[in-house]
Structures are given as C-alpha cells and as structure tokens.
Amino acid sequence: MLDCITDDDVGRKLRVAGRMLTYDPSTALVLLSFFSHGLLVDVSLVIDPDAVLSTAVKWGGTLDPSVEYNWIHERKAWVWVVGWLERSEVGHVQCASF
C-alpha cells in the first residue's frame, strides 16, 4: 500500500495499490490515495490518449469492444500499479514508468 513507500524506495520497482482520486487526460497522470498518502502515476505508456480524451472515440466505425472505457469516470476505485518509483521535479515521489 502507499503508506509503506519511503524515500529508500526511489529507484526500485514497486507494486502498490490505492484508490484513484482523479485522472488528468492532458498529462496522463492518475492520483492514487490511501488514507493520507498520495502518489502520482504517469500512465502515458499504457493508456491510449485518443480513447481517454473522448469516450466516444470510434475504432473502425464503432467503439473498440476490447477496451473498457468506464474506468475513466470511476472515482475511488482500487487501482494496482507496477512501476519504477522516481522522484518528480517538485520533490514528491512519483511512480513514473511501467
């Protein structure tokens, strides 16, 4: 869980869980929280930007049936992420790459 992450974890590959508070499609950042702890997760490598900018995106004339778009609107859903923990430029810890 997020409450177990420390500065010693920077540079390590982690698997953490938290509740998604928000997703910003313009930056591809997800804000995860667990009690009073938070983590920004860069999901730009795993999320199709065209799909999240509009849930009505067409794939070959119809919505792609293999993609579930409802997660974009679900807040406080549990999310599990795996990635390398990096320190962001503003000094906060951020899970940056998958």
Image (tube, helix red, strand yellow):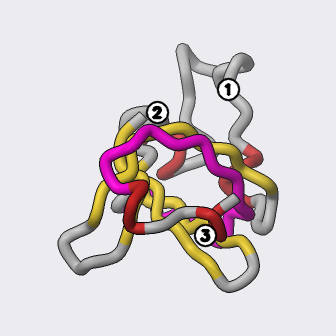
Disc 2 vs disc 1: Cβ atoms closer than 8 Å?
A: no
Circle 3 residue: 22
Residue at 71 percent of width and 50 percent of height: 79
Left or right: 15, with 10 as reference point: right
Residue at 46 percent of width and 65 percent of height: 40
> How packed is label 2: few (under 14 Cα within 10 Å), some, or many (20 or more)?
few
Residue 19 inside the magenta-drawn segment: yes
Circle 2 residue: 46
Tell me where residue 76 appears, x and y as whole percent: 79, 67
Tell me where residue 66 appears, x and y as whole percent: 70, 17
What residue range appears in magenta? 10-26
- State the residue in front, 10 or 44: 10
**Residue type indicated by callout 2:** Val
Nearest to viewer (mark 3 / mark 1):
3
Q: What's the CA distance linking mark 2 and mark 3?
A: 17 Å
Question: Is 39 located above or below residue 51 in the figure?
Answer: below
- State the residue in front, 95 or 57: 95
Picture disc at residue 11: none
Circle 1 residue: 67
Question: Is 93 located above or below residue 53 in the figure?
Answer: below
Q: Quadrant of residue 90?
A: bottom left
**Residue type indicated by callout 3:** Thr
- For the N terminus, which image quadrant? bottom right
- State the residue in front, 38 or 14: 14
